[in-house]
Amino acid sequence: MSGIAKTPQPPYYAVIFTSERTEGDNGYGEMADEMVELASCQPGFLGVESAREGLGITVSYWESLEAIQNWKQNERHLVAQRKGMSEWYQHYKTRVCKVERDYEFEARNT
């Protein structure tokens, strides 16, 4: 998935994962791709946006807090979380937010 996620009308939830990586890939890229694919199959998943230029920021969107909790407890995601703490991240922070309002602009090609 790439670009800006197409989300429904609020309210919905956002999980903001901000990270500083360790040196080298060490399987990170493959696991990150797998996590996006797996998350997209989870009930309540709405979309994801991600950017990395030094600091990494991934925002995933969910229908409910229950959907977020179920994703956090997914077996394969738990493996990725453990590897993240032991191999891939120097520092990370996760924030869970309720989106109450959104708006957008998209230029029209004429």
Image (spheres, grey):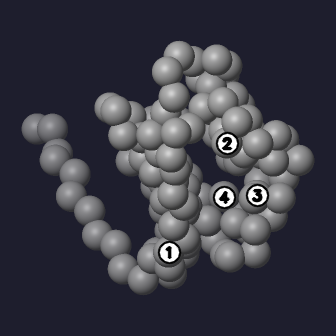
Q: Earlier in the sequence, mark 2 or mark 3?
A: 3
Q: Residue 8 location in percent, x, y?
A: 50, 68
Return the residue at label 3.
71
Q: Is residue 50 left or right of residue 29?
A: left
Earlier in the chain: of badge 1 and badge 3, it is: 3
| Secondary element at tag 2 | helix
Callout 4 touching callout 3 (CB < 8 Å): yes
Q: Position of residue 36 (x, y in %)?
A: 64, 39
Instruction: Name the residue tied to disc 4.
Output: 45
Image point 60% across, 32% down: which residue?
88
Question: Which of the 4 image quarters holds residue 12?
Answer: bottom right
Query: What amino acid is at disc 1?
Result: Cys
Distance of mark 4 from mark 3, alpha carbons? 9 Å
**Disc 2 marks which residue?**
85
Q: Which residue is mark 1?
A: 97
Mark sitting earlier along the chain (4/1): 4
Q: Along the polypeptide, which appears first: circle 2 or circle 1? A: 2
